[in-house]
Image (cartoon, rainbow, N blue to C red):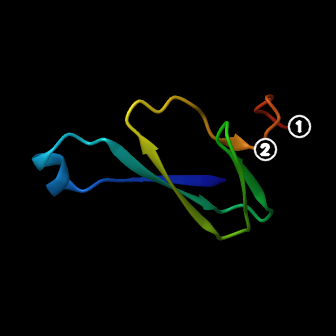
Amino acid sequence: MVRVFLTTSAVIALIAPVLAIEVKFVNNCNRVVNLYDNTKTTSMKPGETVARTLNDGFEGMFRDGADPQATRE
């Protein structure tokens, strides 16, 4: 299971519109997860955390591997 945490700063949100958001992925699996976001792949070892900044208007998805089929048997 990969957990996703969204973080924002309340102070910044009150001062100006949010133009980006940071997403943190935590690999809770007992194997390597190849986090793919339609542009690049990041290998995440078990227990590793990876942060990505998504700009305003981001459209995409995150999955394990670059294969367009999102499910595994």
Badge number at residue 36: none
| Disc 1, SS | loop
Is 4 on the left-hand or right-hand side of 43? Answer: left
| Residue 7 screen position, x and y as percent | 36, 55
Disc with the residue nearer the chain's start (1 vs 2): 2
Going 65% across and 70% down the picture, which residue do you hit?
Answer: 47
Q: Residue furthest bottom?
A: 47
Instruction: State which mark lies toward you, 1 or 2.
Output: 2
15 sits to left or right of 36: left
Residue 22, how many percent across, how many down? 42, 52
Residue carrying label 1: 73
Question: As shown in the figure, which amino acid type bears the numbered disc 2?
Answer: Gly
Horizontally, residue 57 falls left or right of residue 28, namely: left
From what the image shows, is residue 48 above or below residue 7? below
Q: Position of residue 56 (x, y in %)?
A: 37, 35
Residue located at (11% from left, 47% from top)? 14
Image coords of residue 60 (percent x, y): 57, 31
Quarter where residue 50 is shown: bottom right
**Residue at numbered disc 2:** 65
Side of 10 relative to 54 (left or right):
left
